[in-house]
Image (spheres, rainbow, N blue to C red):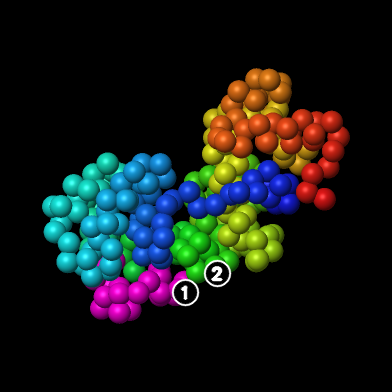
Amino acid sequence: MVRVLAQGYPDAHCELDFTTPLELVVAVILSAQCTDKKVNEVTPALFAKYPTAADYAGADRTELEEMLRPTGFFRNKATSLLGLGAALVEQHDGVVPGNMEELVKLPGVGRKTANVVLGNAFDVPGLTVDTHFGRLVRRWGWTDLEDAVKVEHAIGELVEKRDWTMASHWIVFHGRRVCHAKTPACGACLLMNDCPSYGLGPEDPDKAAKLVKGDEKPHLIELAERVRAGEKLGA
């Protein structure tokens, strides 16, 4: 299934815009209860105004909150960014650490955020268990666990470590584009022969195709048609 997903989403990537580890940490903190698209609308001005950890540490709370307002929970997020900046300056000379142990000690940073940063800013393999990831691996029967940390470790036993970061992207992409929470596009899914939950959504190819989202839609529908015709993907 992982190999098939890789074939379906060869361009999968972190959908938060960033150029530095600090920008990525900030973007992930802002993404809580907010879409990546909205975060990407807010961050250009934010990154320009606060390019360093020291800038966040010394930020005016009112100004910072106003910039964060469109992302929701802006007061809590402002508190996290103020604390993040101060902690980085005081403990790490303003530099984002590249290991799990130090990252999770930072304000606003849990294992999910740390794994995103490690995998995408430092090329350290990490499984990012967000809402889509947990939903899909349970739907597929890879685990029945609910706790994110336990899910992370359980899936880490199933997937090659070198693939952890990309597997996270492939699964999240699939969850956003095909395997929707309420009505998955089962009849247009490249995993239709392997998924134990096949049939939760419409099996009719035309009806299912209407549910597929994203720029990859033509590619995904073509692959699903090949699967339906008996071709084995990911071999």
SS at mark 1? loop
The magenta region covers 84-104
Q: List x then y, in percent, for residue 159.
A: 68, 60
The numbered mark at residue 235 is: none
Q: Is residue 101 left or right of residue 139?
A: left
Q: Is residue 151 left or right of residue 54?
A: right
In the picture, residue 226 is in which quadrant? top right
Q: Foreground: 33 or 116?
A: 116
Q: Foreground: 185 or 50?
A: 50
Q: Where does label 1 land, which residue?
A: 99
Query: Is the C-beta separation of discs 1 and 2 under 8 Å?
Result: yes
Mark nearer the N terminus (1 vs 2): 1
Q: Residue at x 58, y 66 (%)?
A: 125
In the rendered view, would you say 97 is above or below 201? below
* Magenta part, dominant SS: helix
In the picture, residue 77 is in which quadrant? bottom left
For the residues labelled 1 and 2, the Cα–Cα distance comes to 8 Å
Q: Where does label 2 land, which residue?
A: 124
Q: Residue at x 62, y 33 (%)?
A: 217
Is residue 88 shown in magenta?
A: yes
In the picture, residue 161 is in which quadrant? bottom right
SS at mark 2? loop
Q: For the view shown, which residue lies furthest in the right direction?
A: 230
Would you call the spot at circle 2 few (<14 residues within 10 Å), some (14-19), or many (20 or more)?
A: some
Look at the image and tell me whether residue 137 can be seen: no
Q: List x then y, in percent, for residue 132.
A: 53, 45
